[in-house]
């Protein structure tokens, strides 16, 4: 079994040099995932000088670890949106995601890469009888929103369901190959892409644009900046306090026989199970969501997912495993557009794991704003400066109270003797009188870091399954040597050289 996304393992992603000298462009796009590359391509085709600034490499973040589902079927959401915000908002969300889906299909057909795109139905289903009423309400709300939704109990799964909602004519892609194609299209349109270029500072300069400074000191001056980094880095816009992070586990398995030809997701209160076919005899299995740092035994998430897959399908082998992260907003609508920080700094975040459709819709909004076009009729519902309704504000208060509790209480975990760390294991240790985060690699070398997040100083927790230090407060993650894996942190952890 290979540790890592099947999409990254089966795609030839282009490599680009790091930015080595100061640069001036019309639009600087921070982040080389789906939102960043799609936005860069659209604005480059509009004639703008654009540079994509990626901290690691194309597809290294969440975009390379998705399911590849491009669909407006997002579990049970439309009834909730209509109830909380009204039918116009639910309809706008539906139109945005249908337009995002159509744009992915259009681009996939243009790119000189086989994106393995195919049209399949998408189902959200309930196994338990008590889910029937929720499904019925969702079918009605989705139909009122103009979506191709029908109620059914006929779902291509090896177990019965009580009720389901079916969306026809949805889309599957190979995310890695799609990203590779987008990157090639950006370059062909005259855009520049730089890997290994992490941006650490954003300086709004009034009518003189935005200055971005990389952690290596190189500067980029742009008329507009787009932050397409899953969550805006640092303190920009306060989005770290207006969203919550979630991680999910994923397996790519080979079956003895054909895989179900549909996208499915469960909506019972039990752990989510999200499926899609991979090859003719393969299946992607995703589930067991949790907030980063909240699970002491992260290996259990993978084990449970494999146990479920083997119990329900004839699994020959588990070929790949990986985890992915995203952020949700309190009102279930992404933040897209100008930030409170500056009208020249734009962002897109809070896609709650449905970023292939809604992230592409976000790129359409961002390109319209940059070009000064009137924009889509639905784009106002994603206003990135909004506070939200009373329920959203209440949820924000509750979430940030839990962050405060973690900031204080998360510092008192037991620290052990580094000699007790077996190869391949990590955890809190006492070393030379300091309380540190330790990891002993398979070769026996001890790696030690300060286990305090460089974003806002929250304590970090060891993630054994993914060999990382994770922040429960806002979702930042670091590797065993302290390098940033996920923001909003931009600075690495302090390293300590053990005396052993």
Image (tube, rainbow, N blue to C red):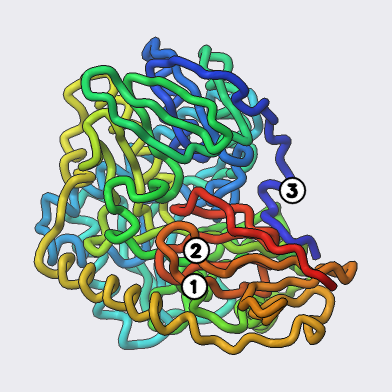
User: Which is more foreground, mark 2 or mark 3?
Assistant: 2
User: Which is more foreground, mark 1 or mark 3?
Assistant: 1
Residue drawn at x 59%, y 58% as measured from the top left = 493
Q: CA distance from mark 1 to mark 3?
A: 33 Å
Say left or right for 448 vs 316: left
Return the x and y of residue 151 as percentages of the image width and height.
32, 67
Where's the N terminus, which quadrant? bottom right
Identify which residue, 405 or 42, lies in the foreground. 405
Residue where numbered disc 2 is placed: 453
Graded by Cα atoms within 10 Å as few (under 14), some (14 to 19) or many (20 or more), the crowding at tag 2 reads many
Q: Earlier in the sequence, mark 1 or mark 3?
A: 3
Graded by Cα atoms within 10 Å as few (under 14), some (14 to 19) or many (20 or more), the crowding at tag 3 reads some
| Disc 1 to disc 2: CB gap under 8 Å | yes
Residue where numbered disc 3 is placed: 9
The residue most toward the right is: 443
Q: Earlier in the sequence, mark 1 or mark 2?
A: 2
Where's the C terminus, which quadrant? bottom right
Say left or right for 467 vs 48: right
Residue where numbered disc 1 is placed: 459
Residue 140, picture quadrant? bottom left
Return the x and y of residue 62 as percentages of the image width and height.
53, 51
Residue 394, picture quadrant? bottom left
The local secondary structure at tag 1 comes to: loop
| Disc 1 to disc 3: CB gap under 8 Å | no
- The reply to whether residue 309 is visible in this rendering is no
Identify which residue, 274 or 245, lies in the foreground. 245
The local secondary structure at tag 3 comes to: helix
Q: Is residue 153 above or below residue 370?
A: below
């Amino acid at each position: 079994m290979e540790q890592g996304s099947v999409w990254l393992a089966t795609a030839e992603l282009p490599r680009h040099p790091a930015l080595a000298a100061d640069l001036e462009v019309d639009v600087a796009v921070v982040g080389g995932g789906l939102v960043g590359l799609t936005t860069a391509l659209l604005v480059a085709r509009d004639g703008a000088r654009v540079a994509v600034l990626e901290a690691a490499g194309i597809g290294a973040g969440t975009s390379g670890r998705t399911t590849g589902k491009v669909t407006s079927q997002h579990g049970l959401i439309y009834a909730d949106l209509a109830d909380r915000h009204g039918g116009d908002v639910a309809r706008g969300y539906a139109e945005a995601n249908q337009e995002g889906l159509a744009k992915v299909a259009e681009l996939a057909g243009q790119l000189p890469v086989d994106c393995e795109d195919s049209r399949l139905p998408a189902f959200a289903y309930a196994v338990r009888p008590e889910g029937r009423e929720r499904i019925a309400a969702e079918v009605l709300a989705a139909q009122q929103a103009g979506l191709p939704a029908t109620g059914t109990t006929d779902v291509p799964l090896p177990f019965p369901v009580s009720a389901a909602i079916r969306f026809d004519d949805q889309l599957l892609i190979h995310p890695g190959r799609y990203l590779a194609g987008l990157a090639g299209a950006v370059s062909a349109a005259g855009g520049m892409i730089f890997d290994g270029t992490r941006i650490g500072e954003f300086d709004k300069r009034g009518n003189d644009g935005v200055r971005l400074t990389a952690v290596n000191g190189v500067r980029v001056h742009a008329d507009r900046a787009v932050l397409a980094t899953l969550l805006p880095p640092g303190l920009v816009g306060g989005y770290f306090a207006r969203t919550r992070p979630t991680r999910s586990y994923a397996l790519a398995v080979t079956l003895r026989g054909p895989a179900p030809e549909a996208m499915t997701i469960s909506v019972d209160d039990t752990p989510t199970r999200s499926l899609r076919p991979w090859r003719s005899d393969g299946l992607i299995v995703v589930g067991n969501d949790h907030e980063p740092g909240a699970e002491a035994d992260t290996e259990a998430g993978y084990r449970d997912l494999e146990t479920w897959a083997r119990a329900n399908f004839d699994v020959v082998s588990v070929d790949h495993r990986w985890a992915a992260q995203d952020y949700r907003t309190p009102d279930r609508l992404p933040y897209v557009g100008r930030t409170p920080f500056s009208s020249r700094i734009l962002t897109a975040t809070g896609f709650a794991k449905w970023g292939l459709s809604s992230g592409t819709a976000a790129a359409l909004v961002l390109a319209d704003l940059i070009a000064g076009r009137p924009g889509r009729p639905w784009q106002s519902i994603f206003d990135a400066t909004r506070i939200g309704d009373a329920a959203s504000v209440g949820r924000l208060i509750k979430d940030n109270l839990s962050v405060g509790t973690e900031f204080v209480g998360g510092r008192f975990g037991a620290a052990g003797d580094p000699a007790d760390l077996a190869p391949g294991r990590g955890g809190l240790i006492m070393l030379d009188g300091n309380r540190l985060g330790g990891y002993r690699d398979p070769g026996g070398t001890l790696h030690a870091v300060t286990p305090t997040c460089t974003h806002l100083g929250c304590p970090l927790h060891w993630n054994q399954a993914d060999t990382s230090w994770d922040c429960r407060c806002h979702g930042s993650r670091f590797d065993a040597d302290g390098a940033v894996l996920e923001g909003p942190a931009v600075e690495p952890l302090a390293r300590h050289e053990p005396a052993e």
